[in-house]
Amino acid sequence: MVSRAPPNELKPRAPRLYIVTPPVSDAHRLAASLEAVLDAGDVAAVLLRSAANDEALIRRHVDTIAPLAQRAGTALLIEAMPELASHTVADGAHVDDLSGLSAALKVLKPDRIVGAGGLKTRHDAMVAGEMGADYVMFGEPDATGRRPSVVALIERVAWWAELFELPCVGFASELEEVSQLAAAGADFVAAGDLVWHDPDGPASGLRALAARLGTRETV
């Protein structure tokens, strides 16, 4: 069962960042930008998304990106392909449904990270925690680009942070959401386009995110 948070447990002073890559077709091109991003601030994890389902290509992507992540002390996760993650130097995988989570746990635990997203209800989130996910993610866009309202997202993160010890990741699509998620109690704030589409470059985007994390009151 998911552990409920002790009422006086100290929370981190601020959440850490979790960066989601754009769909990658050229890992060497991504590597140049990612190196600058990781040098610009504290990034806890990078989720590597591939533009193709070619396992050999994704292996090459991991081989290119992993050294950058390892140097920065950043976990490298693969999107949706836990079996492949188990045969690479990646630190784990992120999956977007409960059936995928079940399969991922079988091949990756106990040595690697398994993250759970695509959680449409509170019940789904609690089931993911009970199954053994290392974190739950709320607010990420689905395959069509749709996501919950900001109000619903902040409510979900605050609910989880108040009741459960398992870390939660809140996905920010707008810069203003970063500070809202931090205040709600997210352990990590995830972002994709906010980093990669910053007009002054990805490193600038990362610094803008970090500046919004602020300081969270302890409970």
Image (cartoon, grey):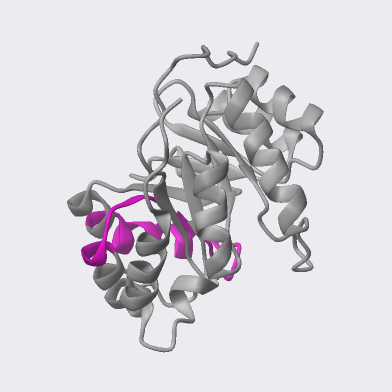
Q: Which of 107 and 29 is in front in this view?
A: 29
Magenta segment includes 99: no
The total of numbered circles placed on residues is: 0
Q: Is residue 118 visible?
A: yes
Q: Nearer the viewer, residue 183 or 19?
A: 183
Q: Residue furthest bottom?
A: 199
Name, please, the residue furthest toward the left: 71
At 71% from the left and 31% from the top, the residue drawn is 125
Decide if residue 46 is in sight here.
no
In the image, residue 160 lies at what x, y percent? 64, 30
Look at 48% across and 66% down and name the residue there. Answer: 21
The correct choice, above or below, for 84 with respect to 130 in the image is below
Q: Where is residue 66 in the image (x, y as percent from the top left)?
A: 30, 54
Residue drawn 51% across the image and 31% down it: 167
Q: Assign the N terminus to one quadrant of the image.
A: top right
Q: What stretch is highlighted in magenta?
A: 38-67
Q: In this view, does 79 lie above or below 11?
A: below
Viewer-proximal residue among 67 and 176: 176
Q: In this view, does 51 lie to the left or right of 39?
A: right
Residue 200 appears in which quarter of the rendering? Answer: bottom left
Query: Where 191 sits versus 92, above or below?
Result: below
The picture quadrant where one finds residue 101 is: top right
Is 53 magenta? The answer is yes
> Residue visible at 35% across and 38% down?
13
Residue 204 in percent (x, y) is at 33, 77
Q: Percent position (x, y) of residue 36? A: 25, 72
